[in-house]
Image: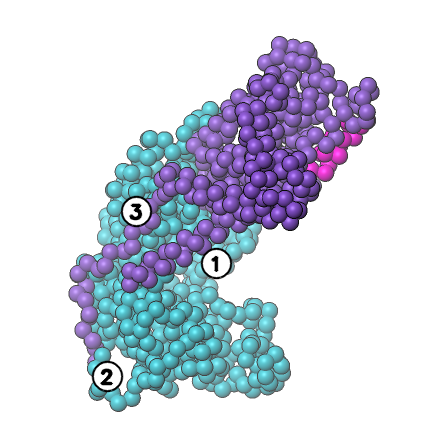
Amino acid sequence: MTAAPTTNPTEPAAPAPAPPERPGWRAVAGRQAAAIGYTVVIGLVLASVLIYSQGYAPFATIQSGLQYAVGDPTQVARTFAWGLPLYVAALGVAIAFRSGMFNIGAEGQMYAGALAAALTGAYLGPLFSPAHLLLCTLAAGLAGGLIAAGLGWLRAAWGVDEVLSTLLSNYIVILFCAYLAIGPLRDTTRQSGTTKEVADTARFGELVPRSGLTTAVFVVVVVAIVIWWLSERSVLGYRWRMTGESPAFASSVGIDVFKARVSSMALSGFVCGVAGSLLVTASQGRFWTEIASGIGWDGVLIALVARSRPVATVIWVSVYCVMRSAARGIEQASEVPSELSLVLISAIIIAAAAQARVFHQFAQLRHRLGSLRRS
Amino acid sequence: MNETTRPDAPLLEASGITKRFGPVVANEDVHLDLRAGEVHALVGENGAGKTTLMRMLFGMYQPDAGVIRVRGEERQFRRPQDAIDAQIGMVHQHFMLVPTFTVAENITLGAEPGGPGLYSKDRAKEAIAEPMRRLGVDIDPEAVTGRLSVATQQKIEIVKVLYRGARVLILDEPTAVLTPQETTELFELLRRLAAEGSAIVFISHKLGEVFAVADRITVLRRGRTVGTYDAAATDAAEVVAAMTGRSDVNLGRVERVVPEEQPPVLLVDAVSTEKPGHDAALDQVSFTVRAGEILGIAGVEGNGQTALAEALVGTLALTGGSVSISGTDVGGLDVAARRDHGLGYVPEDRHHEGLPINGTVLEAIAPCEVRKRTGLGVLASALSAKVRTTATGLVREYDIKAAGVDAVCSTLSGGNQQKIVVARELEEQPACLVLAQPTRGVDLGAIEYLYGRIAEATARGCAVLLVSADLDEILRLSDRVLVMYRGRVVAEKQTLDTTREELGMHMMGATTGGAA
């Protein structure tokens, strides 16, 4: 009744499937490029439909929009000058995401940073300019960092959900800053809602004439490199990443999860505060009640879309800057109302957020087709 | 199989079954036939394709090729209900019971005797009497399921399957949650069901149990059927050889020289904890482990063994008592400081605690080096050339099958993942090593290898605490064994002077004077 074993037990069995290789940077870059290309195509199609429905020629209108965004060096400088604080804010949010902390209080931390920088710039000095700028930036970072660190501590020590607490902190911080700007710190020589203008030594010099692009661009480059190193290469970043990806692993090998959570939130808030300071020191020169105008929220969105990888974050911010600037150009050239541009940008962001999944499904489909062909 | 000698077709037959998941072939040309009246064991290492095959027989997956026949008639199961209609039932490893429902409610749930959704207490009680009688058990239909013992809940699962008319029962690792006595009792029930004409598939990797209950044994290896054996005409060595493809696997006690009168390394004195969510609270647990000794901790899962490992390593706070390693009191220190004092830890849940499952091999080996960085050192590179060299060396030394140190941990087999964890922990030459379920989900060849490395560590004086739900593991490896029950140590035995049965009695709460 017993069947003889169909194979000799000592015979080597079929080799196990080779584990997939770790993708090299080329493959990663290729995938990023594909993702961005997909988003751009979706954006162009949506924009064409919108523009056509308003009675304009899509191609010519989009071309003039792009002309406005990146048509000549001054326009390029203008496009990216607007984006400088966004680069910093998105990177700041990404740090917290990497350790599993959802810091969606970036907007509030930017307001706190902007106010701290504006006060340091206005009431201290004039000083030697680099020192004054350093002080403004540090004050802003400290303001944002303390807020975020406090909320991170609440999460790590008492389990207060940081999504909720950071979200609500936006209202507290923004409205408190608004109260100060309307009330005790109001610049009495101006209309309501602004603080005193900062000293000239607390402003970055213009790099490209009449573009608004200042030497703050160097600060942004340094911030980006430091954050990349910290989060992707350093011991600190390793602890953050392990805490975010496998908290149980982290605590069982002796990583202090509490410390990792609080420190990543503190740095995240610090960087968002610095982003806020750039609004003052690299552009507006004073604090006013709606100074960040949603840049912190844009930063949260982009950090999500870029899955909190620093390099991807920088690339997505650049794409976002061009899109936004082009939308403005289209608005001017075609009278497509600005509300529709906003709709368009939102749709593009949703498409971008969806694309990771979409590409994943395409890859799976191809895989299955491939295995069918082999069999 | 020589079918022509039996005029009656098998109750259930799977023939030439192939199933692929993307590039992975889970089953290839697999054969299995079940006859009325037999207990048929399906054995194989992890990843051999046992679960995939069973899921196809139960309609949860559809085969890419091959046929399933019920009493000689070809059938296609598109969903589990099709299999239930063909009188096939499955008892899952994790029970599918609503803890707040009564026994009768759980058994009839979804197939109420009065019609869908119409529940009548009396009719349900009547309807479940017959399947209870078939199995030969008598459970109070009014009892609340969650308050019953795990072994009773398992019987409810079986009654549930019988209630739905099953003649073929598939049991996926049913003994994992049972004591030896409960296992024996389960086997009697299974034999009884077989005797009245049912066919039972018993999935297991414990060979002792397989030979205790099965009439025939089908062995799978790497997705293929190696063969079907008559239990009476084969032995464990042949089955192990078929499972592993090797003929030299040692299943007996791990031989090593145990040094006499070594100084104690791990001193645990009257340790108590709060109740963690997943286990019992520790209550005045005391013991010592000497240098070079392996102390086994046995017990049915959920009696404080997990809490003990966590309290020792520092992820669960003590509410009383003290823990010291090599003379230093570490009870108040955090995990990193305890590790600095010579504690190594192989956690029971490899995927959550042992490894960063979506991280790389390098990231899994890095913690020891990274832990020592303080001050400005935290700004330096984490995965430095030095860490990479260490990791590459360990991958080679432990023969870890990975595409390299940059391979993602989730792509490795359970055995290779566990080798990474053990390699990392032994690399630091700990004075005391806590092993929690060190070979769960690890294939036999890797188990033998890991035991060898652990024996080596004890030879240089490492004190080992072995927490395991697998009595075979405890009996093979440990010198002394403590049995835990409801957070307390209820017995202490020399491994060579005890038996499975004796330990099993203590696992159900019997105490002895030998307890600490």
Query: Which image quadrant: the C terminus of chain A?
Result: bottom left
Q: Earlier in the sequence, mark 3 or mark 2?
A: 2
Residue positioned 56% across, 37% down in the render: A63
The vertical placement of B160 against B430, above or below, is: below
Pointer 1: what residue? B303
Identify which amino acid the numbered label 1 is placed on. Answer: Asn
Please identify, in this view, whether the residue under mark 1 or under mark 3 is nearer the observer. 3
Asked if marks 3 and 2 touch (Cβ < 8 Å), the reply is no
Residue A176 part of the magenta segment: yes
Chain B drawing hue: cyan
The residue drawn where x is 45% and y is 73% is B79
Q: Colour of chain A?
A: purple
> Which residue bears the numbered disc 3?
B402
Q: Residues under labels 3 and 2: Cα distance?
A: 44 Å
| Overall secondary structure of the magenta section | helix
User: Looking at the picture, which amino acid does disc 2 mark?
Assistant: Glu
Q: Which stretch appears magenta?
A: A169-183
